[in-house]
Amino acid sequence: MSSAEMSPLHAACALLSFAPLVVLGVPPIWTQPEQVHLSYAGVPGSMVVTWTTFNWTESAVEYGLLGGCLFELSARGEAALFVDSGDEKRKMFIHRVTLSDLKPAATYVYHCGGDDGWSEVFSFTALNNSSSFSPRFALYGDLGNENPQSLARLQKETQLGMYDVILHIGDFAYDMHEDNARIGDEFMRQIQSIAAYVPYMTCPGNHEASYNFSNYRNRFSMPGQTESLWYSWNLGSAHIISLSTEVYFYLEFGLELLFKQYEWLKKDLEEANKPENRAVRPWIITMGHRPMYCSDDDQDDCTTFDSLVRLGRNDTKPPAPGLEDLFYLYGVDVELWAHEHTYERLWPVYGDKVHNGSTEHPYVNPKAPVHIIAGSAGCREKTDRFNPNPKEWSAFRSTDYGYSRMQVLNSTHLYLEQVSDDQYGKVIDSIWVVKEKHGFSAWL
């Protein structure tokens, strides 16, 4: 057949065969979405999709209900330029798109990117808005690129639908800024198999401190207007607060941050403790990286009686208040920590003294907050050693690699357990926290 005899269809096919890269457009790698992760925007029916490209391109998410018309919905956002502070001054674009009006407990299928490149297809289940919802959490801190021992088990359990939310309580990648932030890139790629499917909620740790926490502040998308340093949100019958313990240690980045967070915490706790709010969300749970108490043998802040996080700093003008009295005053129920590369469960403790509910049932109507330290997910620094003579508030300790699970069942019952990755997923510790009353009056 001569060219003159070709039909328009044959001619078009011939053109495509000679110029596949021009017409079909294989997208260059620098506009291909990667490091996809979800976070809860704090507003019922919402989810934030965050991802990275290495050149500017559009920020779009196409999504739809599982089993429905694929990608029938779409939302657009924007890309923010992030320039790492390393020698190479590497540039990347952090894309954020907020999905709204999601149906509670409905499963959605989505991809993100644009005409220059789309991600693979992911799915998530929108969070249930009801205060009677019983959310399931995996929680841990101190997970690195090297020796991320718990990661494979967490990936599988996430894919099995075991969790509604992940809480990562500081220290990511070890460290995100290293190799001109390439370690951060690799870590965000690693956790995509978890974080692209369930909200991945975070707080900063000491390993994020370089360049004034810039990799942490730019890569994550938590609720509020404080660049993910501190924020709060509601889920089921719980009010959850994420905070920065690092404001007590990195004063070179501004003492005002410490006081700003403290005042924010106070206002947030006051609001959460209003009778009408505490009736709906009776559990108040905090997450912060460095614990107030621990029995590791490493001479860290929590091993001293005058812990800065617990009691504050007297070497500043004015003196900086600690968090223990504030949390006790407003009846914080459970405090989640990491930083120590171990697992430790404490008896209910306040003022360095045990305040059990009773001898037989210490966590039934406890007279002080319950502290859990879960910092053994796995990193290049390995696990820590314990002091052979812990104080009386130390109830259970393990140096196994692992992570914790938590479920807030209802207004009175909360369940916690520790999983050992060294023992192939065995649950090595568990407790029920039972509270008939919440707030300061529960301690009396």
Image: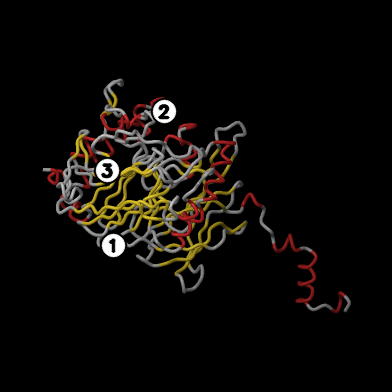
**Secondary structure type for disc 1:** loop
Q: How crowded is mark 1: few (under 14 residues within 10 Å), some or many (20 or more)?
A: some
In-image side of 339 versus 189 (left or right): left
In-image side of 418 versus 438 (left or right): right
The tag on residue 253 is: 2
Q: What residue type is labelled 1?
A: Phe
Q: How crowded is mark 2: few (under 14 residues within 10 Å), some or many (20 or more)?
A: some
Task: Say which residue label 1 marks.
Answer: 133
Q: To which quarter of the image does residue 205 belong?
A: top left
Along the line of sight, the residue nearer the viewer: 242 or 51:
242
**Secondary structure type for disc 3:** strand
The tag on residue 301 is: none
Q: Which amino acid does label 3 sit on?
A: Ala
| Nearest-to-viewer mark from 3 and 2 | 3
Q: Which amino acid does label 2 sit on?
A: Phe
Residue 127 on image: x %, y %: 36, 60
In-image side of 113 versus 130 (left or right): right
Q: In which quarter of the image is the N terminus?
A: bottom right
Q: Residues within 10 Å of mark 3 (few under 14, many from 20)?
A: few
Q: To which quarter of the image does residue 100 belong?
A: bottom left
Can you say whether 124 is above or below 339 in the image? below
The tag on residue 395 is: 3
Residue 159 on image: x %, y %: 46, 62
